[in-house]
Image (cartoon, rainbow, N blue to C red):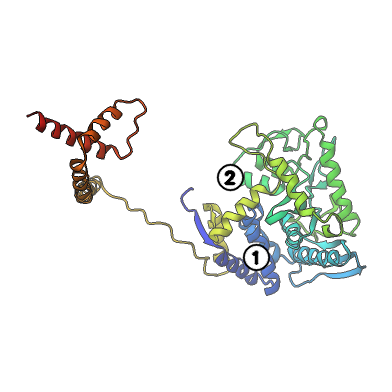
């Protein structure tokens, strides 16, 4: 951990983030939804969508292009489907509304699909699949997004990274949960690498000259991210196809923008509404195989049980890393953040004139001079010697009565017993029935008695 890192209690963090959105003019109920979306991103291990992006989230909320007061409304619905108008509200507000609606319909009829138009970026896709899994349901969530993906054989971006999430519950809290972009790397992950000055692997992005680009800063400016597969020979048509599929479900089906028409959100020069579309599908597995959760756990455990290439890296299934991270964070009730994120929190506090979120005090580290350290070591050595002497005295005091009793027992015994003991001792099968200290005392006592008789 570098200097400047801090640890924050989750309740304090949620309150601070809520206060930031309130200060930005977001209504209380929507501020609470936004705070949950941001903080849960870090808890789930998707830090690129969490506090790292708080300033950007708040800037979006402050911008007049997004209506922070708007609430989504249902334009058309049936028992198993709904078409929702997000009314340009905050993305997480629209997404949570839609997924909860799909969950309720799926519980009633077995399966449901809800699509939304006129929305905005909703953050981590897996968050909404998890809402369904918590109810024992299968959850699917996806969204289209700003055009960053360059289709196979094309020069320019024409589709979004279009993330998708699918989650299925297993037994006793086990589950399968995948959350992925249709590009090799998400836009947020590339942004985070840029912030840290890290290079990209070849096959993630290309520059304006359509050549492989490893500089994250250049890649962000070029906005040409490669689809899953990277190259046509490696199956990049699959990533391209997935992105278009999501655009059909989220953009074409919902009536929102699609392909290159989706608004360029989170940039300093976008001038129109993003009009992003979402799609949520929920299935009640109890309407099908009765042992669905058991069978899901059996499947994922069969994958985990495979022999790994590297014994130090066991085989995992999607969702395992995030679940372990969540478990650790929820056990402690706190999250650690590096210096740059802490600086972002402090900056948000200054902007909105808020008291910064309290940090958990760090253990005090005492720095001593060489002479102070020497003195402390000598004092510790003296204390250790005293403890050793006290321990010796206690041992002697405890074992003296035992040895006296043992001596009396041996003296009262017959000489035949001593001879039998000597004979037995020379046998290779001899096993001392008592501790070595006691046996040594018996031998010493035997020798003393024998010497007395000889004299």
| Residue at x-position 66% and y-position 64% | 36
Please state the total of marks drawn on the protein image: 2
Task: Provide residue 336's location: percent of width, then percent of height.
Answer: 53, 55
Q: Does the image show residue 267?
A: no
Residue placed under numbered mark 2 in the picture: 196
Q: Nearer the viewer, mark 1 or mark 2?
A: 1
Real-space Cα distance between discs 1 and 2?
A: 25 Å
Task: Provide residue 52's location: percent of width, then percent of height.
Answer: 61, 55
Residue density around tag 2, few if under 14, some if 14–19, many if 20 or more, within 10 Å: few
| Residue at x-position 85% and y-position 63% | 106
Q: Tell me if 20 is positioned left or right of 229 in this view.
A: left
Where does the C terminus fall, quadrant-wise? top left
Residue placed under numbered mark 1 in the picture: 35
Residue density around tag 1, few if under 14, some if 14–19, many if 20 or more, within 10 Å: many
Q: Does the image show residue 416?
A: yes
Give the farthest residue toward the bottom: 28
Task: Provide residue 320's location: percent of width, then percent of height.
Answer: 66, 48
Q: Tell me if 229 is positioned left or right of 359 in this view.
A: right
Of 10 and 193, the residue lying toward us: 10
Sequence-wise first label, 1 or 2: 1
Residue 441 is drawn in which quadrant? Answer: top left
Task: Give the label on residue 171, or none.
Answer: none
Of 109 and 45, the residue lying toward us: 109
Of 257 and 303, the residue lying toward us: 303
| Residue at x-position 33% and y-position 26% | 427
Q: 323 above or below 106?
A: above
Secondary structure, mark 2, is helix
Secondary structure, mark 1, is helix
Residue 154 is drawn in which quadrant? Answer: top right
């Amino acid at each position: 951990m570098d200097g400047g890192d801090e640890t924050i209690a989750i309740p304090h963090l949620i309150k601070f983030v809520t206060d930031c959105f309130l200060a930005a003019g977001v209504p209380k109920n929507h501020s609470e939804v936004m705070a949950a979306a941001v903080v849960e991103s870090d808890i789930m291990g998707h830090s690129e969508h969490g506090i790292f992006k708080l300033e950007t989230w708040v800037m979006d909320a402050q911008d007049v292009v997004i209506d922070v007061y708007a609430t989504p409304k249902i334009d058309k619905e049936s028992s198993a489907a709904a078409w929702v108008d997000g009314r340009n509200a905050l993305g997480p507000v629209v997404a949570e509304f839609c997924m909860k609606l799909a969950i309720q319909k799926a519980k009633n009829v077995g399966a449901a699909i809800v699509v939304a138009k006129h929305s905005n970026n909703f953050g981590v896709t897996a968050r909404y699949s998890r809402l369904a899994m918590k109810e024992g349901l299968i959850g699917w969530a996806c969204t289209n997004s700003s055009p960053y993906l360059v289709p196979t054989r094309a020069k320019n971006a024409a589709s979004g990274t279009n993330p998708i999430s699918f989650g299925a519950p297993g037994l006793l809290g086990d589950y399968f949960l995948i959350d992925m972009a249709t590009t090799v790397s998400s836009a947020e992950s590339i942004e985070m690498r840029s912030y840290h000055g890290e290079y990209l692997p070849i096959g993630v992005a290309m520059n304006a000259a359509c050549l492989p680009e490893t500089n994250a800063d250049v890649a962000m400016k070029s906005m040409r991210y490669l689809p899953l597969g990277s190259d046509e020979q490696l199956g990049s048509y699959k990533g391209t196809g997935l992105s278009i599929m999501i655009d059909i479900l989220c953009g074409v089906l919902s009536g929102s923008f699609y392909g290159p028409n989706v608004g360029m959100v989170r940039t300093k020069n976008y001038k129109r509404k993003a009009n992003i579309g979402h799609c949520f599908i929920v299935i009640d597995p109890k309407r099908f195989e009765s042992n669905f959760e058991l069978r899901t756990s059996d499947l994922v455990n069969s994958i985990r049980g495979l022999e790994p290439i590297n014994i130090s890296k066991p085989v995992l299934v999607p969702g395992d890393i995030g679940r372990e991270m969540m478990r650790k964070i929820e056990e402690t009730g706190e999250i650690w953040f590096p210096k740059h994120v802490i600086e972002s929190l402090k900056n948000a506090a200054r902007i909105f004139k808020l008291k910064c979120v309290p940090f958990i005090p760090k253990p005090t580290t005492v720095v001593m001079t060489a002479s102070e350290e020497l003195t402390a070591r000598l004092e510790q050595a003296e204390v250790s010697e005293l403890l050793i002497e006290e321990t010796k005295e206690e041992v002697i005091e405890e074992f003296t009565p035992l040895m006296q009793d043992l001596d009396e027992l041996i003296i009262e015994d017959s000489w035949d017993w001593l001879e039998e003991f000597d004979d037995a001792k020379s046998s290779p099968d001899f096993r001392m029935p008592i501790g070595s200290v006691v046996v040594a005392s018996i031998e010493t006592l035997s020798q003393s008695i024998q010497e007395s008789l000889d004299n």
